[in-house]
Image: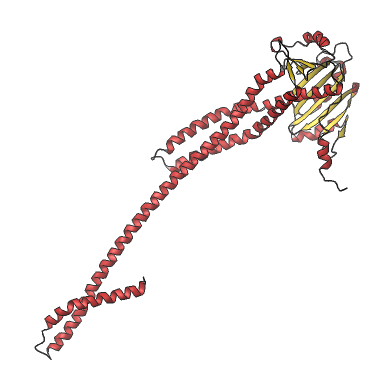
């Protein structure tokens, strides 16, 4: 078989993003980091110490391996950074100590801290068998009771968290399996983490949206001022066009600085909605559910980001419409100038025609005068032969025929030269 060059890559995509089975009881630590392109080589070199490649050898996106003290890990490369998760059973005396206080994690945390990147989210997920065990441990996690979120997931599992960052830099989640099959529970836990990871990535767009809002306010005021000035006939077109071009460039700069981040935020927000639906959340009386927490805090932020994107598009559209109106005003002025120029040219042509006709009439008179003068000389000479010839009467009689003949002659020549 001649395989398509991308066949194994696309098939491998279906097997990525998988976690090993989570031990119950156990502890899962996950970091989501943003890694620059020039830091990827360093990251891969550190991962190669303990991992093996899963998937495409040329461009590995998924690695897993085992650290000292039998701590397994899974690493995945994303378009924006990476994620790394550690998995270990809790067989020590206090599985809910802060992660940095657990002796078997010291070397693993040192290795994690050596990896490049900036942390977007770090979470410690404490896994227990059932609600009874969880009720003994919840007070020891020091979660804020006023902001405690707890609900059922897929009808069996239950989670607790206040979604705050603890003194050690980790957010805390407590999840009770309550008899779920281990494979299903692992998949549930992964979706729960993906929900939080995508939520944090989506929220990266909120500061960007908030930072450009004043620039959009200023642009809207400038646009309103320009709209009023366009209606003022005393305003020069060149000045208006220059200011409108400057405003359009400002809006393009805003769009260029926000489009990628806001588009990514919209994509992550859709993934958050998908994960919420997949978790099949059931509220518990007396507690905020994960869906309530998301709707109360996450959705308003996403609406702000959406509003910024829509406002930027509307301002760009209004600027484009105003530019069209200004161009129409300029074209109208040019057409009026052309009309006045054509009218002036028509008047000039009319005057030239009249002058030409006047000159033509004078030419007929002048030619007739000179022709009659010549005839007068001839008649005066003939008067010596015929004394009874009245020369003045003959000349007077020939005036009109001569003028008529001259006019006909000039008209015939003009017609022959100019045509119809």
Q: Residue at x 24, y 78 (%)?
A: 405
Can residue 138 be seen?
yes
The front one of 313 and 82 is 313
- Whole-percent x and y of residue 212? 58, 29
Way the structure is coloured: secondary structure
Q: Position of residue 283 (x, y in %)?
A: 72, 15
Residue drawn 25% across and 76% down? Answer: 406
- The x, y position of residue 139, in whole percent, is 77, 8
Asked if residue 167 is positioned above or below residue 317 in the image, the reply reads above
| Image quadrant assignment for residue 78 | top right
Most distant residue in the left direction: 388
Q: Residue 328 occupies which quadrant of the picture? A: top left
**Residue 17, located in which quarter of the rendered image?**
top right
Residue 89 image point, x, y percent: 88, 18
Q: Relative to the observer, which residue lies in front, 12 or 205?
A: 12
Foreground residue among 61 and 117: 61
Answer with left or right where residue 376 lies relative to residue 167.
left
How many numbered marks does the figure carry?
Answer: 0
User: Is 406 positioned to the left or the right of 162 in the image?
Assistant: left
């Amino acid at each position: 078989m001649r395989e398509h060059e991308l066949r194994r890559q696309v098939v491998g995509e279906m097997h990525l993003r998988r976690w090993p089975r989570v031990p119950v009881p156990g502890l899962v630590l996950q970091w989501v980091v943003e890694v620059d392109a020039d830091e990827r080589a360093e990251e891969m070199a550190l991962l190669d110490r303990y991992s093996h490649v899963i998937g495409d050898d040329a461009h590995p996106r998924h690695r897993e391996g085992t650290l000292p003290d039998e701590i397994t890990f899974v690493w995945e490369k994303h378009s924006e950074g990476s994620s790394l998760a550690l998995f270990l059973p809790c067989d020590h005396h206090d599985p809910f100590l802060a992660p940095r206080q657990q002796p078997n994690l010291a070397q693993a945390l040192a290795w994690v801290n050596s990896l490049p990147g900036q942390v977007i989210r770090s979470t410690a997920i404490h896994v227990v068998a059932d609600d009874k065990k969880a009720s003994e441990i919840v007070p020891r996690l020091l979660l804020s009771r006023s902001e405690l979120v707890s609900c059922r997931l897929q009808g069996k599992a239950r989670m607790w968290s206040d979604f705050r960052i603890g003194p050690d830099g980790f957010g805390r989640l407590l999840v009770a399996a309550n008899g779920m099959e281990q494979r299903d529970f692992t998949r549930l836990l992964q979706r729960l983490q993906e929900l939080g990871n995508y939520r944090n990535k989506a929220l990266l767009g909120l500061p960007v949206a908030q930072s450009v809002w004043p620039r959009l306010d200023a642009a809207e005021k400038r646009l309103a001022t320009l709209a009023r000035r366009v209606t003022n006939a005393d305003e020069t077109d060149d000045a208006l066009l220059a200011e409108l071009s400057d405003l359009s460039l400002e809006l393009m700069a805003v769009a260029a600085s926000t489009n990628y981040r806001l588009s990514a935020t919209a994509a992550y927000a859709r993934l958050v909605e998908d994960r919420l639906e997949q978790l099949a959340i059931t509220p518990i009386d007396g507690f905020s559910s994960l869906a309530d927490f998301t709707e109360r805090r996450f959705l308003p932020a996403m609406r702000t980001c959406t509003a910024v994107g829509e406002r930027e598009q509307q301002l760009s559209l209004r600027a484009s419409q105003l530019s069209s109106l200004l161009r129409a005003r300029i074209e109208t002025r040019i057409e009026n100038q052309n009309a006045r120029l054509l009218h002036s040219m028509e008047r000039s042509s009319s005057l030239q025609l009249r002058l030409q006709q006047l000159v033509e009439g004078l030419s007929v008179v002048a030619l007739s005068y000179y022709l009659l003068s010549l005839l007068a000389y001839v008649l005066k000479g003939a008067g010596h032969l015929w004394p009874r010839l009245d020369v003045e009467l003959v000349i007077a009689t020939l005036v009109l025929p001569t003028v008529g003949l001259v006019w006909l002659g000039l008209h015939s020549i003009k017609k022959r030269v100019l045509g119809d």
